[in-house]
Image (spheres, grey):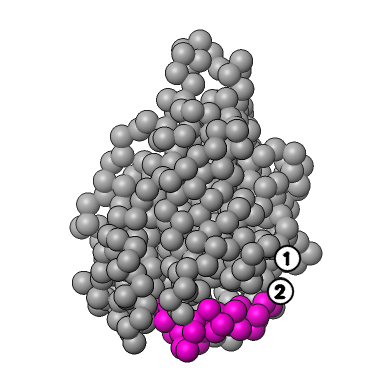
Amino acid sequence: MKLSGWGRYPVLDCEVEHLRRWDRLADLVRTERTLIARGNGRSYGDAALNQDRTLSMLAMDRMLAFDAETGVLTCEAGVLLCDILATFLPRGWMPPVVPGTASVTVGGMIAADVHGKNHHRDGSFGRHVESLELLAGDGEVRHCNRAENSTAFFATVGGMGLTGVIISASFRMKRVETGYLRSESFATADLDATMSLFEDSRDWPYSVAWIDCLAGSGKAGRSVLSRAAFADLSALPPRLADEPFGAGRRIALEVPDVMPGSLLGMSARSFNALYYGWGRARSGTKLVGYGSFFFPLDRLAEWNRLYGRPGFVQYQCVLPKSESASGLKRLLARLAAVRRGSFLAVLKLLGEEGEGMMSFPMEGYTLALDIPVRPGLAELMDALDEITHEHGGRVYLAKDACTSAAGLRAGYARLTEFQSARGTLAGHEPRFASALSERLGL
């Protein structure tokens, strides 16, 4: 069947197998063909595509154990984040780190070592994983943690599925009293003001900014920044206190698969200006439901269709703290020069380096841009990569569809260590591969 990532680019003909029992997995690994595990298809590019065999993990979705004293949940890799939230948030438990959508699997969150709006305080998801079970290319199942099979553990966290198939994982949840957050939002005048506000917001658990990437001279990088913390039960008004975890129940609207590819691109500058004005008018303090704060786009099902059948790419990079201001200004200037603005440009402050050998985060700022697929895309991606690497940054492989092998080497200092670990886990030859790994020569 034809498969793609969330960006709908590229699209490849893949042989798909739906894994329904674990003993079948060992048989698949013993064949001479390569394979890659696929969760819910929310990586944006070609990370979960293999034309030989793409293995859907969605049926492997059992929650296996939960310790109510420690908050440690053990579940299979195909469990969806939205199901964890539906099951445990009403009981007062929240996953420690969540990405921008709840429609991801636990296996995918580990493979991409996802980060959230609290990375500056709590790190990425991998830091909260206590152990995992991995079936590697040699056919063996390994129990991996920071002490036992630690090389396999750190290669798998952020390893984009290239070390094997994650069977199950245990990670620690955190206590919350409600499903609401106390949020403050501010409109900033330019990039310098935005970054200054991020630094002033370090004591807040969560922070994120929508950034206007097409603002004119003197306004480049103006943003609407939100910072938030989970609200205590005592902070809720009576109408909410009776049902403190009802904040995520919303009906999703679905985008039809008939949108013209140029619909968004024609009005990006106008949208950016309107959204900034709307955000400025709504600045202030308010209570928001966890769904609205963490997963705003989940309210619009299949929103990736807004970019039309050609699809889009998401370019996400992180720049070291010392290089962030100059590098971000160059990236924004490049986008403005070619008039390729993004509707969903997001800026976040990241904390310490990820534990995984191929983890994306580093201390600094990360910018994520959605860019429609149309002529000139490859040249623009190359230009953005060049700026990123000149400033010591790296691109996020879970979002990537365009970077080169040279770009990968420039951004990931532990690449050689990862390749060595992957080779050891593979047995005689690599069994786990993807269109991404082939493109990057991994």
- What whole-number distance in Å separates the C-alpha atoms at marks 2 and 1? 7 Å
Q: Residue at x 28, y 41 (%)?
A: 253
Checking the image for residue 105, the label placed there is none
Residue 160 higher or lower than 260, as above or below = below
Q: In this view, does 6 lie to the left or right of 378?
A: left
Q: Does the magenta stretch include residue 428?
A: yes
Q: Residue 13 is drawn in which quadrant? A: bottom left
Q: Does the magenta stretch include residue 261?
A: no
Q: Give the range drawn in magenta.
A: 413-442
104 relative position to 254: left or right: right
Marks 2 and 1 close (CB-CB < 8 Å): yes
Which of the two residues, 259 or 273, is positioned nearer the viewer here?
A: 259
The crowding category of the residue bearing disc 2, from other C-alpha atoms within 10 Å (few below 14, some 14 to 19, many at least 20), is some
Please determine whether, in this image, residue 247 is positioned above or below residue 204.
Answer: above
Q: Mark 1 points at which residue?
A: 320
Q: Name the residue under label 2.
A: 392
Label 1 crowd bin: few (<14), some (14–19), many (20+), radius 10 Å: many
Q: Which amino acid does label 1 sit on?
A: Pro
Residue 171: give x, y in percent of width and height.
56, 48
